[in-house]
Image (cartoon, coloured by chain):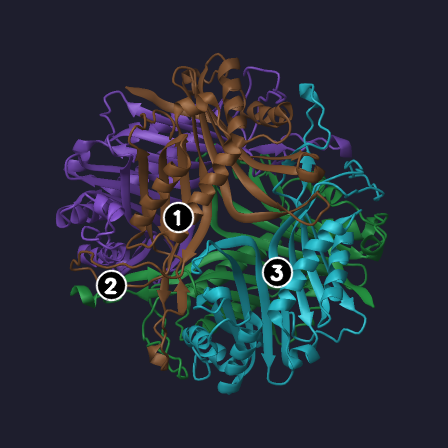
Chain colours: A brown, B purple, C green, D cyan
Amino acid sequence: MVQLGGNRYGKAEVRLVHVARGAGASGADLIRDWNVGTSLSGDLADSHLTGSNAKVLPTDSQKNKVYALARELGGDVAPEVFGVELGSFFVSSQEPITRARVSVDEYGWTPVGAAGYSFARAGDLVRTTVVHVDAAAGTTVVSGLKDLVVMNTTASEFWGYPKDRYTTLAETRDRILATSVTAAWRFRPEAVAAGVDWDAAFRAGKSAVLETFAATYTYSLQQMLYAIGSALLDALPAVCEVRLSLPNKHHYLVDLAPFGLANDREVYLAGDRPYGLIEGAVLADDAPEPGIAWD
Amino acid sequence: MVQLGGNRYGKAEVRLVHVARGAGASGADLIRDWNVGTSLSGDLADSHLTGSNAKVLPTDSQKNKVYALARELGGDVAPEVFGVELGSFFVSSQEPITRARVSVDEYGWTPVGAAGYSFARAGDLVRTTVVHVDAAAGTTVVSGLKDLVVMNTTASEFWGYPKDRYTTLAETRDRILATSVTAAWRFRPEAVAAGVDWDAAFRAGKSAVLETFAATYTYSLQQMLYAIGSALLDALPAVCEVRLSLPNKHHYLVDLAPFGLANDREVYLAGDRPYGLIEGAVLADDAPEPGIAWD
Amino acid sequence: MVQLGGNRYGKAEVRLVHVARGAGASGADLIRDWNVGTSLSGDLADSHLTGSNAKVLPTDSQKNKVYALARELGGDVAPEVFGVELGSFFVSSQEPITRARVSVDEYGWTPVGAAGYSFARAGDLVRTTVVHVDAAAGTTVVSGLKDLVVMNTTASEFWGYPKDRYTTLAETRDRILATSVTAAWRFRPEAVAAGVDWDAAFRAGKSAVLETFAATYTYSLQQMLYAIGSALLDALPAVCEVRLSLPNKHHYLVDLAPFGLANDREVYLAGDRPYGLIEGAVLADDAPEPGIAWD
Amino acid sequence: MVQLGGNRYGKAEVRLVHVARGAGASGADLIRDWNVGTSLSGDLADSHLTGSNAKVLPTDSQKNKVYALARELGGDVAPEVFGVELGSFFVSSQEPITRARVSVDEYGWTPVGAAGYSFARAGDLVRTTVVHVDAAAGTTVVSGLKDLVVMNTTASEFWGYPKDRYTTLAETRDRILATSVTAAWRFRPEAVAAGVDWDAAFRAGKSAVLETFAATYTYSLQQMLYAIGSALLDALPAVCEVRLSLPNKHHYLVDLAPFGLANDREVYLAGDRPYGLIEGAVLADDAPEPGIAWD
């Protein structure tokens, strides 16, 4: 009376650092520092039901292919290219596997000094990509960033909201607005097929997020979400949909009146929990259905 | 050319400890230690597009209601009951809000001594629940557990898998199988409507996971996933679907031969990353469509 | 004009799981799940000043010895025994090394079912030990526990404190007292020399902490610290000093009056940061000087 | 038969964001984003032994003073100045308190755009300071940084080490050297008394670490430690001692030979655990005794 539903398996958190020796400006090294995940699905019921592994390419082999593919592709390769190649490899080489999901988180490094081989971790954000390769549905690419923490010390208000029996929050015409941006943008199928300058797209996306955050006067974080989403669609013509998750990193103005002190937007308590959380999507009017892109 | 897509907002990680004084055996206190999240959706485009907050009940008010509702419901209340009540409150009291999602993580405490007011954190798992209340689609309840770390020191094999060019893994007829179980079970709509003994269901679910893990000889973690899912469906007649995520917490037998030592299944290295990750669903044959339950 | 000061080096976080097959009751397996660190010091100036590694036993070799020693000692060995053996090995076999520090964190596992090979992570605390072996100063052993989270839902007051210009805290005759106990107990040199039943000592120490926490009515967390320290000295005659670190895990009674609700010690907010932090030592009157024991 | 030993208490992790409005270049805001800890000691035996709180200034009052002092000092204040003022306040205003320890972690923010009020978290390191104010021993200041992750993709060798029975590591003439720098520098008492340009000192210290890391060809991480320590003493004449903790973030060259691929210093696995850990101090020849500075 019981059936197997959707399922997939793979290797998570394969840590790969690829040094492209001398590939940078003036012969400097370039670093690709990645955390790669693979996840395969297809005709895999046997392994669940009978214990037969005849169709289960080991996750260890998947990990080995991650390292080998980095070498095979060589040099300074965008994570999106890597994801498409890796996913295609699994789907094309393993008969039972009809779909592969590849995720790559990329950590940034900043050159230090002139030696060309010294770097410091940037630490300001993580670049992300998730690629699906499906034997029938084709290839999807969703890229983006996470852990980009930004703050406006002013230019934000919050008022005019409904007050129910449980509302005690005071309206404000000036507050700190801070968040940790998680943004993911889905590329149009025709752009994926034609090829994209993925690194340039990432730089443009990151700039759009930062510039929009700085330039937008807000009455809510929802407004910021929509502004960033729209800006990303504007900056990235190859993109048809953006999804954003914006925690409201509350900064509470500390009441110093008990100590005889004014506090005119100066001293804040940075709260941990709870926090507001705003999630939403912004799409081009002609965005095609996402299909498996966000799985 | 741009449109707003799906969106929701709310308060995350509201930390609530409810002491039910004297409500336990022999007049002991009972503790409900929760991490609550709320997420509302509905007619909220204005806040994104115009900055009007006229329909945006503050997340601070949502947080206040969490604490107030705990007091209003009183005593020793299951997280599922709390979630249904809280979600219904938002949907019924805020006209623009047509759907609420409430999540509750519950941390366990073990009584210490006979005083009735001393406890130690159990630390062995987190009980979870996610409730959706939708004005049109009704109410869904998905409960479960996470962070339940288990190990079989034997009774697991892994062999007979395909070997491709990148396969170096040796087959084994005996290995440690360890995982951190994340399991979520969806209750049937009619059971949600009729009411469930949620605490008893959780205890039965936890027991089913533990007993099945101990009793199942495996040739793959996929097999364990299916066994646990089936056992949960068997133990919980009110449940129609189970979703599981099982990381393979690899334990590598250390090669001590270079030191002139045998190592007959004795000394292992517990690896961090990478790890295998097996995800899947097991459903009753007559499981209705999930609709919004897993959103 | 510059000199090298104190220094040491070693391998941190060597993850070792030792399965003692059939060594438990009724032939069940026993698990020792450890996180081991080594740190060596001695005549090591050359490596800092000249780059010569002639006296630097690789940290990789140290790691290898951790795994090999587990096999050499066999079976179900206490972490203190392991630490003494490992430290002595380095000091006796590497001429430039005059001191070794070995730390072992032990994670607990609870048997599941009757199979004898199934376990669940206990998760309630971590057992700790730090051993120093010094060619001149001898051997010291400090053991203890950390991450033991406990709560009294009542039997705690806080009042009668000085009020300065910055004091706004209200006195209370009833509060929740919760903390995460870190306790470390130093064994007397003669006990270390004579040998100790380390596992029994740990069990007695853990019990003393839990029982004292439950049995002590407090006016401050300092009082609890002293009570636990004294109880540990009482329970463990082989111990001469206890050091404790007790964060005050604040639980704030939520003000529900704005919502027309009383809140008689029922609904609390569990705070994250900031937290009080109480640190202190309790010693036997005849405790010898600690020397290097706490380094 | 039992006595109270050393003890202290205070408030940990007070999160303070101070916005100095218009205090920066071109009228931009400046941000000081801090995590502050206080710890007081003195005549506090009563609270441990009798439960009397007559000498225990609440940790809540300490927290309040943190926020109030930020306002009282105003503007763009270095964490060292803040620490000295805060410590002095407690010692001078609370008769039983004879020593205060104040720690400040500072998180960096980078201006975004030209608005003057938008910032992004730098994320590349944390600036640290620990101040002790003691009624008898005076004031000490130790500053530094942590979480500065750096990598040399070459210019590092490791060979010539002793080989014992447990040594399997191959010598290498070229490896990646990566670490996460924790450095703390102790200021000379006379410099503390005379005053220091603390922000300039931090910038100089950070530069010294980065430049030395990039410029130093190493045969061991110990050598790097000494080079960085020496460079810091050279760059900071007001400093008499540096303490460093350098985890060896191992990058293992992946063996691709089984797949018919060469791997000439190109594809690496970034390991998590275990890791080497090198700790050491470098002192000026005339460094005075540290006293309480490192407590």
The numbered mark 2 sits on a residue in which chain? A
Label 2 residue SS: loop
Q: Amino acid at mark 1?
A: Thr
The front one of A179 and C254 is: A179
Q: CA distance from mark 1 to mark 3?
A: 32 Å
Using the rendered image of the protein, determine whether residue C77 is visible from the camera's viewpoint: yes
Q: CA distance from mark 2 to mark 3?
A: 39 Å
Residue at which label 1 appears: A212
Circle 3 Cα neighbour tier, 10 Å, few/some/many (<14 / 14–19 / ≥20): many
The numbered mark 1 sits on a residue in which chain? A
In this rendering, position of residue A2 left or right of residue A71 = left
Residue displayed at 61% across by 39% down? C18
In this rendering, position of residue C230 left or right of residue A142 = right
Q: Are marks 1 and 2 in contact (CB under 8 Å)?
A: no
Residue displayed at 32% across by 47% down? A278
The percent position of residue A258, horizontal first and vertical second, equals 34, 79
Task: Tell me the quarter of the image containing the C terminus of chain C.
Answer: bottom right
Residue at which label 3 appears: D145
The percent position of residue C161, horizontal first and vertical second, equals 40, 82
Circle 1 Cα neighbour tier, 10 Å, few/some/many (<14 / 14–19 / ≥20): many
Using the rendered image of the protein, determine whether residue D13 is visible from the camera's viewpoint: no
Q: Amino acid at mark 3?
A: Leu
Label 1 vs label 2, nearer the camera: 1
Residue sticking out furthest to the front: D26
The numbered mark 3 sits on a residue in which chain? D
